[in-house]
Amino acid sequence: MVAAQTGAEITGLDISADQIEKARTAAAEAGLAIRFDEGNAQALPYADGDFDAVASVFGIIFAPDHALAAAELTRVCRPGARFAITAWTPDEWFRLGVRLRPDYEGETAHQWGDEEHVRALFPEAMLSFERGESSISAASTDDCWELLSKSVPPLKAWLDTLGPEERESAASEYKQLLGDGSLTREYVLILGTRP
């Protein structure tokens, strides 16, 4: 939304209809004209070279086929366009997800935090990498869990498949990582320029 506030023409895309609706509501409340599309990072519904800049905030990293998603991102960028991707590094939150969920869709997402892996995905792009931390906080551990369990689409979808006892067991394990009601995770910011 920050880019839209500068007057840039913005298009948002997500695979989750629920997340798209939340984004539309937030944009409308802020008085911003942003186009939102439901779509898949592995088959972007845009023409070659449609965008001057592309940003993916913890999105493209969950595409099962990293090479295809990277090729699609490159395809929709015009020559000289800049792109930015945020990716989680493998941490306790990630390892818990892999342990608890046999079909964990983020199992390979951490590979986007590996510079060598990313350079192989974008062999012709000029790339740089920066590290940072992201925190989500709430008034208590329970409040933080409530926020995360309802607002992280893959986590919410998985929790919705569980019975009450399984859900409570999963909540108990995740809450151990939320200590004082916050979750801090390291991320990598990948900055690139399409040749």
Image (cartoon, helix red, strand yellow):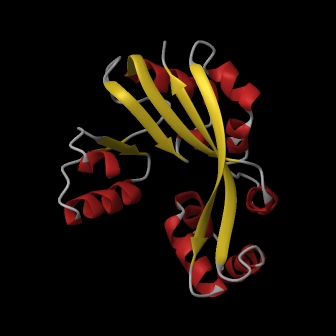
Rendered view: 39 above or below 33: above
Rendered view: 15 above or below 176: above
Q: Position of residue 42 (x, y in %)?
A: 50, 30
Rendered view: 169 above or below 91: below
Quadrant of residue 67 within the rendered picture: top right
Q: Position of residue 24 (x, y in %)?
A: 27, 57
Q: Position of residue 11 (x, y in %)?
A: 29, 40
In the image, is 75 to the left or to the right of 121? left
Quadrant of residue 3 within the rendered picture: top left
Q: Position of residue 15 (x, y in %)?
A: 44, 46
Q: Residue at x 60, y 20 (%)?
A: 122
**In this orientation, does residue 68 appear?**
yes
Q: Residue at x 73, y 46 (%)?
A: 107
Quadrant of residue 78 within the rendered picture: top left
**In this orientation, does residue 65 appear?**
no
Q: Nearer the viewer, residue 195 or 147?
A: 195
The mark total stands at: 0
Q: Nearer the viewer, residue 91 or 66?
A: 91
Q: Nearer the viewer, residue 158 or 82?
A: 82
